[in-house]
Amino acid sequence: MAKLFQHGTLAMLVDGLFGGTIDSNELLKHGDFGIGTAEGLNGELIVLNGVIYQALADGSVQKVNDEMLPFADVNWSKFENRVQVENANMQNVDQLLSKEAMFHNTFVAIKLTGTFDKVQTRVVEKQERPYPGLSETASQQKVFDAQTISGTVVGYYTPELFNGAGVAGMHLHFLDDKHQFGGHLLGFEATKAVLSWQILDGLDLELPTGDSEFMGHHPSSMEDVHQSISESEK
Amino acid sequence: MAKLFQHGTLAMLVDGLFGGTIDSNELLKHGDFGIGTAEGLNGELIVLNGVIYQALADGSVQKVNDEMLPFADVNWSKFENRVQVENANMQNVDQLLSKEAMFHNTFVAIKLTGTFDKVQTRVVEKQERPYPGLSETASQQKVFDAQTISGTVVGYYTPELFNGAGVAGMHLHFLDDKHQFGGHLLGFEATKAVLSWQILDGLDLELPTGDSEFMGHHPSSMEDVHQSISESEK
C-alpha cells in the first residue's frame, strides 16, 4: 500500500500553529517526493529525489537540513502513469487529470516536467510569534515570475472529503532544474510537458500529539477553515 | 506512534458503497480493539481483545471469521488513562472526556466497562444490491434494550475536521460480557463504570483503490454527506 504521508493539517496552519513539529530528516523516512512548509511558514518546500528544497521569500532556494516543519506531504514516488501534454497550463492539466486518472475518491501524487515558457510562484514570508492566522500571511507573500525555465511541478490531488486536513483539489509547488527558482505554483504555460501521476492508497496522517500548543488548541469552525484555505491556497 | 487504522470512509457508506473491501483477518493485523460493519451493512462490529464480534439485526451476536468488510476502525489498545465514573451516561461521559482528555484535535480510543443498569443499541439490517444510501437504511434498523448487563463500550472520538471520513465526535458500539447482546450504542445508564481512553497520534487511512466501484464513484457533496451522517450515526 502506497499512501500519502502527511504531518500536520492545513487547519492547524489556518489557526496560526506554525511551530515546527517534525524534523526534516524524520520526514524523509516517509517519502522522497512531496511538498511542505518550514517553521514560521518560512518558505515553500519541494521534496524531490529525497532532498528537501526551500524556496524563500527573498527569491532564493536552499537545501533543508535538520529543520523543524509544521506541515508536509510526502510519498515514495513510483509514477506509473505518464502522458505528454501540449500547451499545458493549470486548467488543462487539471481537466486532463480528472478525466484520465478517474480520481475523486483518493489521493494522487502529481509530477509535471519540461521546459516551461512561463511560471508564476508565490512564497510566504517567514512569520514571527505571536503567529497570525494563515489568511493574514497572504498580504505578505511575494510573487515571482520566470520565463523559459526547466523544472518540475510537484504536488498532490486531495479529495473534497479531506479539505481542511489538506487542500482539496490540486496543491502544487515548483522547483527549477538548477534549484534556484521555486515556490507555491500559481500558474504556468508549457508548449510541451510530461505529466505523471501515481494513485495513492490512502492517507497516513501524523498529528503532533506531543505538542502542547496543538493539543490545547481550540480549532476554528470548519466553515472558517474552508474559507481561509480557499483564500490562501488556491 | 499509535494511530487509528481506518479502512474506508463514512462518506462511502453514505453513498451506498456497502461492498466488502478488506478481509476481517487482514483488519486484525492493524489492531485488536475497534468498531466496524460487514458487507451489505450486515450488523455492527465490535473488535475486542483481537476478536471481531458481529451484532446482527435478529438480536444475536456471532464471531466474524474471514468476512469482507466495507468499513472498520481499529487500533492497538493501550489505555493509559482510567477514571471511575458514577451515574455514567452518554452525556456526562462525553463531557468528562472533553474536559479530562483535552482532545479537540486528534483521534481517541474510548472504552467503558461495568455493569450497566440500562443499555440501548441499534443494528442495521443487512442490505442487498442495488444498495440504498445510508439514510434509507435507518428506517430498517432494529432497536434493542437490555437491563443490568455487564459489558464494554468500544469506540472512538473523531475531530470535527474528519467528519465525513469518520463520524465527528463519539462513535460507540457495545458488547456484553457474554457476547450475546450488542450494537451501535444509542444510550446507557451505569451506576458505576470505568472509563478508559487512549490518545492516538493520527490516522492511518486505507482506501479501497483496487475496487472499481469505489474508484469510479462520483461522491455526494460534503453537505449531503454531513447531513446523512448526522441523521444516521448520531
Image (spheres, coloured by chain):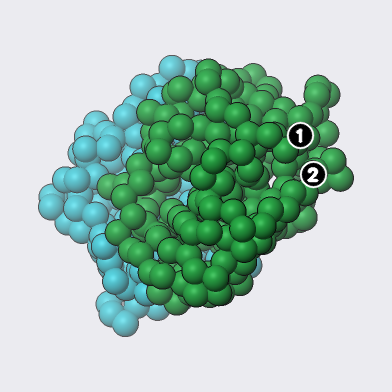
Chain colours: A cyan, B green
Q: Do discs 1 and 2 share a chain?
A: yes
Q: How many marks?
A: 2
Bin the neighbour count of mark 1 within 10 Å (Cα to Cα): few under 14, some 14-19, many 20 and up.
few
Whether label 1 touches label 2, CB < 8 Å: yes
User: Going 77% across and 49% down the picture, which residue do you hit?
Assistant: B143
Res. B58 mark? 1
Name the amino acid, label 1. Answer: Asp
Image position, residue A5 (x, y; %) = 36, 41
Residue B172 location (% of width, % of height): 58, 53
**Residue holding disc 2:** B142
> Eyeballing the image, is B12 above or below A234?
above
Q: Quadrant of residue B43?
A: top right
In the image, residue B94 above or below residue B123: below
Q: Residue at x 13, y 50 (%)?
A: A65
Precedes in sequence: disc 1 or disc 2: 1
Using the image as rendered, state which of residue A17 and residue B67 is in the foreground.
B67
**Image height of B127 relative to B36, above or below:** above
In which quadrant of the rendered image does the N terminus of chain A lie?
A: top left
Viewer-side residue, B148 vs A20: B148
Circle 1 marks a residue in which chain? Answer: B
| Residue A136 place in picture, x, y as percent | 46, 75
Q: Amino acid at mark 2?
A: Lys
Subunit under mark 2: B
Q: Dot 2: what SS?
A: strand
* Farthest front residue in view: B148
Q: In the displayed structure, would residue A28 be above or below residue B209?
A: below
Q: Residue at x 53, y 59 (%)?
A: B115
| Whole-percent x, y for residue A105 in the image | 60, 35
Q: Is residue A34 left or right of residue A167?
A: left
Q: At 40% from the left edge and 59% from the top edge, which residue is drawn?
A: B197
Locate the C terminus of chain A by quadrant: bottom right
